Amino acid sequence: MSEQQNFDVVVIGGGPGGYVAAIRAAQLGMKVACVDAFKAKGDGKLALGGTCLNVGCIPSKAMLDSSRQFHNLTHMFADHGITADNVAIDVKKMVARKDKIVKQFNGGVAQLFKANKVTAFHGFGTLHPERVVKVKLHDGGEAVLKATNVILAAGSVSIELPFAKYDGKYIVDNIGVLDFEETPKRLGVIGAGVIGLEMGSVWRRLGAEVTILEALPDFLAAADADIAKVAAREFKKQGLDIRLGCKVGKVEVKKNEVHLTYNDGKEDQTLVVDKLLVSVGRRAATEGLLAEGTGVRLDGRGMIEVDEHCHTGVEGVWAIGDCVRGPMLAHKASEEGIAVAEMIAGLPGHVDFNTVPWVIYTEPEIAWVGRTEKQCKDEGIPYKVGTFPFAAIGRAVAMNETAGMVKVIAHAETDRILGMHLCGPNVSELVHEGVVAMEFKGSAEDLARICHAHPTLSEAVHEAALAVDKRAIHKA
Ligand code: FAD
């Protein structure tokens, strides 16, 4: 039997929740271990960073950027007087660039662990009673770790449809879609959520015919309806064929083609594609994580139950990130990781869930923070709205990126900002004006009185804040 090793904190999962928690706990003087099972593409070695770094946020953004450059060159630059002959995309090179970026950051996290004296274990961890973590090491053997505190940060995995099992060749999840060797002629996507829209955009820009089937009747139901409407219009112009209210019932691979049968609410339809991405959501990765008798509970959706402080109710056992309630976002996972490490150290760790920003990195980008208009209505909150289009912003016109708008929602009586919703160029950055204003309990008047540089895209935020009280300057 292996000798037990003692730690102040053992983190299971090395994603943006787990590795950030491990580093923060180490900064606070604790002896920390982090267990992660992810195997690097190619050599199968330890690849810290979780879903986010290996097969999520970072690789998808690398490919979104490559495909955006290609699309700009083929479709946008002519307006600037720039033309080029024989423009081509080398997909293998694009994917290799993405892999290089991932590897660079895997090394970066490993370096941070070294600098902070966090011990990494490469293998699968299971929590046993009394905060013992047993690790089935990928190199063989087992490590037994005893911790004063355990942080469960196991993340999430793609939900698989029983009638469309992933085969890695024709039917893929978020991992396979990042590794196509060439642009598919026809790409089908089940699910018009963030991953479906982002990866659909990548391959559409590179020339694929992309059809996205969404079961819900509304497009981007989580976003504000005005923003979703603008985005849907722009995606249609780009040739993304998004079909709403379509329930897929059957998927078959025949002669190198994927045949789908779906019902569009009226009748059965068929769709034939070369590759199919299934992106219908993710579930907590809790299989094998908890041995008998730990006392840690799962809710009806398989998520680890925690209170508002990420505590599981079992002494010294915490859980964070995608495997617990709340949005499945990397920055939410990291904030929870920091908060838990600080609480373990006796500090007042805290996450403000009302100001977690959401971003979809399509073109135009979509971003928001706080309540939508519908949520205000449903909660009976009196509100007022100011909007401003990018088409009236000099910088956006100069950039030739005029689609979209900013919408500010404020309380009708107190003027406090309740939400900010954006669709347009660089709104993944602009949304943080709303985050900061809301975090400081700011009003629309506060934003309206802040001097914004000219010409910048952030003037759209300023004007939307002014528009809340009908005093936007550049709006007729
Ligand atoms: P994860 O990142 O999933 O990490 C969990 C880690 O734990 C993994 O390495 C896993 O192998 C390991 N693990 C699990 N169980 C065990 C075990 N028992 N023993 C040992 N190790 C274990 N979010 C954003 O905010 N912005 C984006 O742009 C964005 N883009 C995305 C794009 C895609 C294609 C996908 C799939 C996701 C994207 N996300 C994005 C979501 C983001 O990746 C997750 O919210 C984030 O990774 C969650 O972090 P986490 O630490 O909770 O879990």
Image (tube, rainbow, N blue to C red):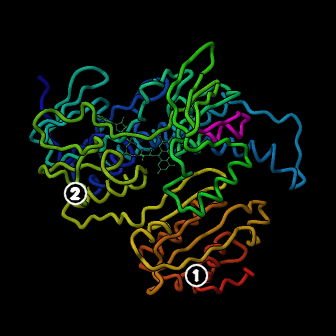
Residue 40 position (above or below residue 155): above
- Outermost residue on the top side: it is 255
Is residue 203 inside the magenta stretch? yes
Q: Position of residue 200 (x, y in %)?
A: 62, 39
Q: Residue at x 71, y 77 (%)?
A: 454
What is the quadrant of the C terminus in the image? bottom right
Q: Nearest the camera: 364 or 84?
A: 364
**Is the residue marked by circle 2 packed among few (<14), some (14-19), or many (20+) residues within 10 Å?**
few
Question: Residue 281, how many percent across, how many down?
Answer: 44, 41
N-term mark: 1 or 2: 2
The CA span between labels 1 and 2 is 36 Å
Which region of the structure is painted magenta? 200-213
Identify residue type, mark 1: Val
Where 473 sits versus 290, above or below?
below
Front position in the image: 373 or 172: 373
Which dot, 1 or 2, sits closer to the camera?
Answer: 1
Q: Are marks 1 and 2 in contact (CB under 8 Å)?
A: no
| Rendering quarter of residue 137 | top left
Front residue (pair 327, 343): 327
x%, y% of residue 387? 62, 74
Q: Quadrant of residue 401?
A: bottom right
Q: Would you say 401 lies left or right of 258 here?
A: right
Q: Which mark is residue 468?
A: 1
Question: Circle 1 sits in a helix, a strand or a loop, which is it?
Answer: loop
Q: Is residue 103 visible?
A: no
- Residue 431 spot, x, y in % from top left: 54, 65
Residue 307 badge? 2
Q: Quadrant of ligand 1?
A: top left
Magenta residue check for 402: no
